[in-house]
Amino acid sequence: MSDDKTVQYQRFNLTFRIQHIILFVSFLLLAFTGWALKYPEPSLQHMPWWIKLWGGAKSAGIIHRIAGVAMVADFVWHVLYLLYYLGTGKMKIDPATTIIPMPKDVTDVVQNFLYFLGLSKEKPRFRRYTYLQKFDYWAVFWGMGIIGFSGLCLAFPTKFQYLFPNWSIDWIWELMGVLHSDEALLAIVFILLIHFYNEHLKWDKFPMSMLWITGKMTVEELKHEHPLEYEHVMKENPELLKNPERS
Amino acid sequence: MKRCVPVLMLLVGLVLYASSLAYAATFTCLACHSSMKGKVRTDKGAIIEVNIDEDRFSKSVHGTLGCQTCHKTFKENPHETPGGETDKHISDLVSRISQKAAVDPVAYAACNDCHSDIYKAVLESVHGRNIVEKKQKDGALCLDCHGSPHYITHGTKPMTAAQKLAIVDTCGKCHDNEEIVKKYNFTPDVVERYKEHFHGRKLKIGHAGAPSCVDCHGAHSVKKWDDPASPVSWEKRVETCGKCHPGATKKFVTAITHKPAGPIPHYGEKALIVLTIGVFIFIASHVFLDFYAEVRDRFLRKGKEDSHE
């Protein structure tokens, strides 16, 4: 058992870690620089500090565009990378490890709420990705489609006008603005609550897990947080969970 | 060359004398008007402010002018009438704009002495024609937008976002005034619609590159949008939008109408709000219950959790 605390299990490779870092850096920049435009300050006598911080409204807009392009590029890279790995068979879709939502996720939600409320003594036993992690992951796809697309339209209106039919011009830009800012708010609220609570504020995570840098977690953490992934790896590839020096 | 000297001295002397007269006259007027407080009612029933803030006046763009540069005659007032008859072109102008000036139409026409091009443009604009042709009192003339001529200050070039936003509020004095909007059948809520729009939002957060009303509609020579001379007419709009949006097309420029958003963005936004609130309720209760269970397990049922592993 003592090995569990010291043996590090590799969960995410370098590529995924880099993609995650680009994603959150660009996300934070976009959220900060975009916030001002969603809730513009009525008083102009004093420019609010969160606009001044970026060197004024104009440079905040430029930073917003650069971060937006970085985020979209990161997303495209991620999707191409996955397609390549799936296409060449280096990665296989397995119910135990996949990020794709499965029926078990629904029962996990119910089980987890029962546990929270004290109606069940059993915590749901998670696979490689919990339902919240899956939600978090696919939210990015939703956001990328809606916020990314509307953002491009708003940044290059004279180019993207050709996509829209004549009868939509009266309201399409209005709709793009609404989609962009409201979905961004949803993303910010979601990240602030779920992600910050689960990955930063929770008792055994505070202030954060080093997983995002090393890509590793101890076998003990794996058993605790993703018991079914642990069992899956034990069956398929048990060397990954053992101390290489002792075996 | 030597012969020129006395002539030059004479000229300098004359200029100094003239300006000292103007100064003396201004000083004399201000002796009373800078300390007088309150308002008086004229014979015609207009209520006018009699106080002139000497400090603000002297710092204004017109601070070097004498009072009588504009206030050439006083027909109905307690003062001794200065000067004699007014020029014909001024009295012509006075007759055209007199309904705008409650007190001293001659002074109002005197703007034309220095700003004749702009004055002409205004009288030909939709604002000016409302005064001259339709004889309405509420067509905008100089002071309606620029405020008191005594206190006009220098702007900066290029204008700051705050100055541009002030223009929007200036236009809003009439275009956001319920009575006037109704009387002239204006598009309602244009000011609010503009401020909610990208251009208005950008100005609000201090982006001076965003356009205010006058950047698209024109200022002194403003015309109704369906007048082909207006920069936002269908004939000219591509060019106007193209100043900032190169590649603008006829299709692109129909986007901004300042009319209320149609049903699709409206209900789209409502749907998104419902979605956001729904997700918020789910995740907030999730986080709250998770925290509750965490505290319960860690402090109230210490050790129990590990037992089943």
Image: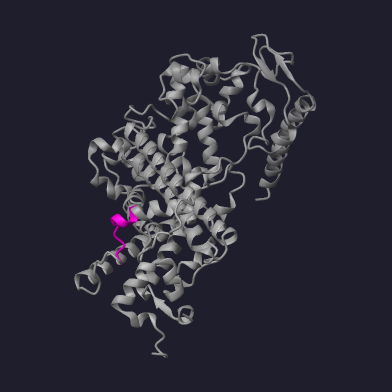
Q: Residue at x 27, y 45 (%)?
A: A161
Q: Residue B186, percent across and down? A: 41, 23
Q: From which residue to which does the magenta span run? A: A97-106
Q: Is residue A84 left or right of residue B57?
A: left
- Tally the marks: 0
Q: Residue at x 43, y 66 (%)?
A: A225
Q: Residue B22, percent across and down? A: 71, 31
Res. B162 image quadrant: top right
On the question of residue B16 being in view, the answer is yes
Please say whether residue A115 is one of the residues in the magenta stretch.
no
Q: Is residue A238 left or right of residue A214?
A: left
Please say whether residue A98 is one of the residues in the magenta stretch.
yes
Q: Residue at x 53, y 66 (%)?
A: A204
Comparing A57 with A188, the one in front is A188
Main secondary-structure element of the magenta-colored stretch: loop
**In the image, residue A159 above or below residue A222:** above
Q: Residue B48, percent across and down? A: 68, 18
Res. A66 image quadrant: bottom left
What colouring does the structure picture have? one colour
Quadrant (top left/top right/bottom left/bottom right) for the C terminus of chain A: bottom left
Comparing B263 with A115, the one in front is A115
Q: Residue B98, percent across and down? A: 55, 15
**In the image, residue B69 above or below residue A73:** above
